[in-house]
Image (cartoon, rainbow, N blue to C red):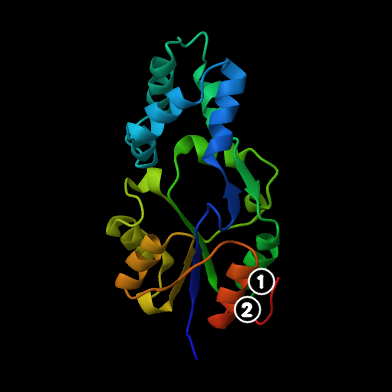
Amino acid sequence: MSHDIEFVYFDLGNVLLAFDPNIAYRNLAERFDIVVDQPWAAVYESGAQDRFEHGELSGEEFAEQIRQAVSLNADQMPTPEILDAVSDMFTPINSMAAVLNAVQSRGLGVGLLSNTCHAHWDWICRQPFYLNEFRFDVTILSFEIGSMKPDQKIYHAAEQKSGVSAGSLLFLDDKQENVDAAVARKWNAVRCHGGPEASLALQDYQVLESSF
């Protein structure tokens, strides 16, 4: 099958970096000697994480939700330590470094399209990850756009920034609802995880000639 792909968007979590929210909350429990269930409920069940990734909460406001849930103050739980604890859950999928470079070396645009919050992105940018050595042509982050996949607003922003037509875009994401939203805009999109699955998807669309 022939495809005329000009620009490839990659999701962050589980495509470029593996992550586990359970690790984040174990970090909090161990660092501040608290019960994991309390901050988990305060963040996820309350919708605070969602609002943080929409850019509706500041880091301080997000941290305060956790402090209130465990009945501790800012001296006992400083905001920077909270934000780093809940962000220290990402590990690089190292084979994706070669994939990104190979796609870009073919003259295609390469972008990042992710639902994430300021705290997670800030922590990632301070790590010695391959991701920070790569130069994306476009970076679309939900907390900056004020919209999260699968909402159409974030796809519209990504489409505009890419500078190519919808049919020339390829998007790799680990969630089916995000892939479906991209397809609804006439993008090419594949649900996959980083590593062999992503490499095979790129071969299927003739973006890569071999696996990495």
Where is 15 relative to 45, above or below? Answer: below
Q: Amino acid at mark 2?
A: Leu
Q: Amino acid at mark 1?
A: Ala
Residue 208: mark in rendering? 2
Q: Which class describes the residues within 10 Å of circle 2: few (<14), some (14-19), or many (20+)?
A: some
Residue drawn where x is 36% and y is 38% of the image: 55
Mark 1 or mark 2: which is in front? 2
- Report the front residue among 16 and 163: 16
Going from N to C along the chain, the mark reached first, 1 or 2, is 1
Where is 13 relative to 182, above or below? Answer: above
Q: Is residue 167 left or right of residue 209?
A: left
Q: Quadrant of residue 126?
A: top right
- Residue 146: x and y in percent read 32, 45
Q: Is residue 105 left or right of residue 5?
A: right
Q: Secondary structure at mark 1?
A: helix
Residue drawn where x is 44% and y is 30% of the image: 40
- Residue 167: x and y in percent read 38, 79
- Residue 20: x and y in percent read 56, 43
Q: Which residue is mark 1?
A: 102
Q: Secondary structure at mark 2?
A: loop
Q: Note whether residue 107 is visible.
A: no
Residue drawn where x is 49% and y is 77% of the image: 6
- Residue 191: x and y in percent read 47, 67
- Report the front residue among 98 and 104: 98
Q: Is residue 200 left or right of residue 54?
A: right
Q: Are marks 1 and 2 in contact (CB under 8 Å)?
A: yes
